[in-house]
Image (spheres, rainbow, N blue to C red):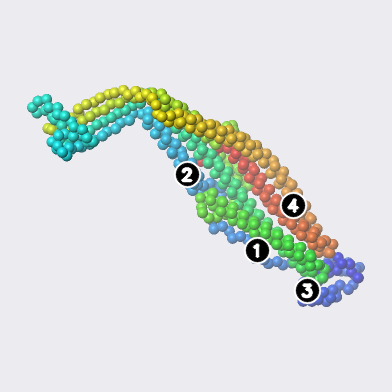
Amino acid sequence: MATPSALLVLLLAAAPQTPASSTPTQQQQPATPDASAAASAPAAVPFQPKVDDPMLTPVPSAPEQVKTWDEALTRVRQRSTDLRSAEAGVTRAQGRWRQSLGLLLPNARANAGAGVDVLHPDVPSTAGGGVVGGINTGTGAKVPSAPLGTLSATLTQSIIDVGAWRGLSSAKATESASVANLQDVQRRLTQGLAQVLVATVAAERAAEINRVGLRQALERQAITQRSFELGAGTQLDVVRVSQDVAVARQSLVAGDEQLRRTRESLGLSLGEDHGVGVNAGFNLAGLVDQTHQECAPLQDLSARPDLVAQRANVDAARESRRQASAGYLPTLGLSTTLLGFTTDPGFGRFATWNVSAVLSVPLWEGGQRGGLVREREGIEQQAAQTLEANRRDVSVEISRARRGVEVAEALLKTAAESLELADRTDRLTRRAFEVGRGSSLELVQSGAALRQAQLALVLREFELVQARLDAFLTEARCDW
């Protein structure tokens, strides 16, 4: 009698020529020679399973794809809502500074009006009430007309106003903070775009690996099913391999959904409301070099835009608090007014032009000024604590980014070694199972380990690219 291993080889070799409806006894009739005869027979052709499953069809390509880094960055510049919001913040801060400056510059105002006394139409009456007395000094003198038209021009100039100067300093610091915040937004958008591009390419690759894993699992299922039909396997073997197929299907479904989500994230980054894919020819390997063209490394950690913005916010809060405290001080201003009105006869005349100095001394405001000072002291303390928290976060972020490159390289090396071992183990396990020396449990385990190793290698490769991008962009400044 032939050994079980030799018998299984002969059965699998004879399977393609044997009708599927043949009984195990009929299929075993050609294998009646002894073991020595079987060993001397020509090498058997292994059973080649054919699998066809709807889930092996790849995910449809995105209707829109990004081809180059420059294209993606240009679209971000044109359509990013975060960028537009940061630019609007700069405009808002500039407007506030101009308002603060206006309190220190001359302020001119002209008023014109016409008034009539309904009860006494012949009596000159100014707009808003009041009667202008006659100024007749002789025959033919000009007197106020009825109805009466008036024109006044007033010019005021602040001479001493400490609070206004403090407000100007606070507004200037706020403007500096908004500009630095815009630069930080540009850096974060560059980093976020690079991350989502890498994630999308990784998800595309992972989806391909999942389909390869499902195909391999289906091939193992076909081999196991064929062995069971030929009487060389058990129902337990079929169940085990079928369970492995179900696990592979779950991984495929989860990977496809992750791919769709990364495409949607890329679309949102590009200012679209639908998914956007990455072209197969996208140069992901040169992405780090391309980001160097848009951003420059920092010589000092404190020059990172987000820290610059936080320090400017602290300065703005400090000056705002000083502005509130300066409200206790007196102010000195200069004012001049020119008044003219219509006359009869004639067109009109200027009656008065006065110049006055105004000294304003605050006495009591019901405690409002003290409350305002305390409020702004709290704002200043909050800004200082936010600065310190951000400084700590940035320090840790940079340390992690620098360390992340070394870690990613080490993980990639171990993942490559693991994949090589998993592939060898899977091939040897399949060969052993085909000749009857391995179990279905070993076949399932080796297949699952191979799929996991393949996915791990893909993820480690993209993690290394991402780590290098993060290491650069966490210590860079991007000026678009």
Circle 4 or circle 2, nearest the eye: 2
* Relative to 72, residue 242 above or below: below
Residue found at x 22% / y 33%: 151
Decide which of tag 1 and tag 4 comes sooner along the chain. Answer: 1
Q: Give the distance between the C-alpha atoms of the residues marked 1 and 4, in whole angstroms.
A: 24 Å
* Numbered mark located on residue 17 in the image: 3
* 461 and 356: which is toward the camera: 356
Q: Give the distance between the C-alpha atoms of the residues marked 4 and 2, in whole angstroms.
A: 46 Å
Q: Tag 4: residue type?
A: Leu
Q: Residues within 10 Å of mark 3 (few under 14, many from 20)?
A: few
Does 432 sit left or right of 335 as displayed? right
Residue found at x 58% / y 36%: 390
Residue 347 x/y as whole percent = 15, 33
Circle 3 or circle 2, nearest the eye: 2
The residue identified by callout 2 is 84
Residue 26 x/y as whole percent = 83, 76
Circle 3 or circle 4, nearest the eye: 4
Decide which of tag 3 and tag 2 comes sooner along the chain. Answer: 3
Q: How many marks?
A: 4
